[in-house]
Amino acid sequence: MAIIRRHALLLGAAALSVTLTATACSSSDKQDSGTAKPASEADVQAALDAGGEITVWAWDPTLKKVVSDFEAKYPKVKVKLVNAGTGNEQYTALQNAIKAGSGVPDIAHVEYYALPQFALAKSLTDLNAFGANKLEGTFTPGPWGGVHAGGSGVYGLPMDSGPMALFYNKEVFDKHKIKVPTTWSEYIAAAEKLHSADPKAYITNDTGDAGFTTSMIWQAGGKPYKVDGTDVGLNFSDPGTKKFTTAWQQLVSKKLLAPVTSWSDGWYKGLGDGTIATLVTGAWMPASLESGVKAGAGKWRVAPMPQWDSGAEATSENGGSSLVVTNASTNKKLAYAFLKYATVDEGAQSRVVAGAFPATTKQLNSPQFQNKKPSYFGGQKINQVLAQSADQVVSGWSYLPFQVYANSIFNDTVGKAYVSGTTLQDGLKSWQDASIKYGQEQGFTVE
């Protein structure tokens, strides 16, 4: 295993220093600049009563109603909702603002895989100062683990989650008399049977995706990343990783995967016409299928994620995001109040109604949620399958404190396995080496 230890001074994006800004501050809360001081519920309520303005950077459309409802409930508070880009676009803008010491929002929308990078750079507020640790049990295990960013702090509150499941085209499976696979061995056999029966049809698509790969390794029990404060280990030769690569390599080598990139026009077409028969992905997928694959209405169903061992009940997360309070915010109590409203209180329910998959156990386990019968999925109670997956997420997973960068070079390393003679295992070794090199360049030391 390669161990990476951080120097006292980090360089580059992961080490951006945070300078206090006057962005959206109220004079009554300027003493909150920098690391948050302990604040009680009464302190947070007092901030709401006093009022002020906060700025939120987020791309999730369900937050628009949350902001409107929040302002109606707390008329002295103004929330400025800004779409600063999606994913990496926003992260780059946020890092630039932090480095410049100007224009940093009070709150930002950050995916779980990116959270450690900002937490390590001390760009985020540890919400334990507001009693966030008392919310344990409010959220499902996967997202709650995600906001800890590999440490003991709570650096955000979960907004949604992506426990994985098997989305499959029942019409295609019925046509070719294929049983819904319960194990990965059965999944590979189904891939062979389908492509043999119809050379234009594939069990799924894959041209190389970092998030999918790490999620699959996660489910297999792999722990290639070890994070202990500023000590980080990388090891893609662990048994869980090899379990995934051994199986998936069969699909790659036998050309049983559609060479179509996810979210492309060809991908949407394939999901609609049956040439891409399944997706193994996060629980947020139903809304994307309903809005983007109209031709699949009534054909798709949801089943539990195939298992590595028959009879096992292990899943992982794919996607999902949190809301964080930046360390540069000068209005931290108001910011935390909004976070809690949006993720725990009334906002959590309104977002689920708008189509978000809940990270909260209350919404996840409610009969209203679990008994929905969407016509797109043939009236199946799909949320029962997805909720069960949320309870079966394997614990102990960590992301790198520079996962944003690592994911950006995935296709330059592992991606070669899909277009050349390179194996997935060799590709992962190259990814590991490149990630270590980047860590060294950022001031980490490899032991």
Image (cartoon, rainbow, N blue to C red):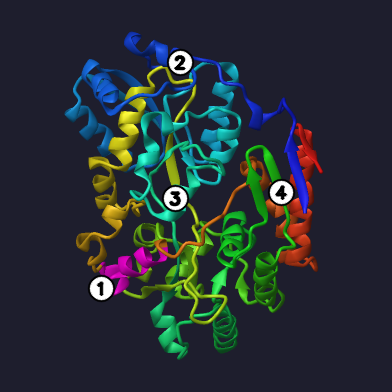
> Upstream in the sequence, badge 1 or badge 3?
3
- Residues tagged 2 and 4 counted as in contact (Cβ below 8 A): no
> Upstream in the sequence, badge 3 or badge 4?
3
Q: In the picture shown, does residue 375 fall above or below 353?
A: below
**Circle 3 sits in a helix, a strand or a loop, which is it?**
helix
- Residues tagged 3 and 4 counted as in contact (Cβ below 8 A): no
Rendered-image quadrant of the C terminus: top right
Where is residue 201? Give x, y as percent. Answer: 54, 78
Tell me the residue at 50%/76% (across/down).
312
User: Which circle marks residue 33 in the picture?
Assistant: 2
> What separation in Å lies between label 3 and label 4 (alpha carbons)?
22 Å
**Circle 1 sits in a helix, a strand or a loop, which is it?**
loop
> Upstream in the sequence, badge 1 or badge 2?
2
Q: What residue does disc 1 label?
A: 379
> What separation in Å lies between label 1 and label 4 (alpha carbons)?
46 Å
Q: What residue does disc 4 label?
A: 233
Magenta span covers which residues? 374-389
Q: What residue does disc 3 label?
A: 143
Nearer the viewer's eye, disc 1 or disc 4?
4
Where is residue 255? Give x, y as percent. Answer: 67, 76
Tell me the residue at 57%/81% (across/down).
191
Tell me the residue at 32%/10% (across/down).
28
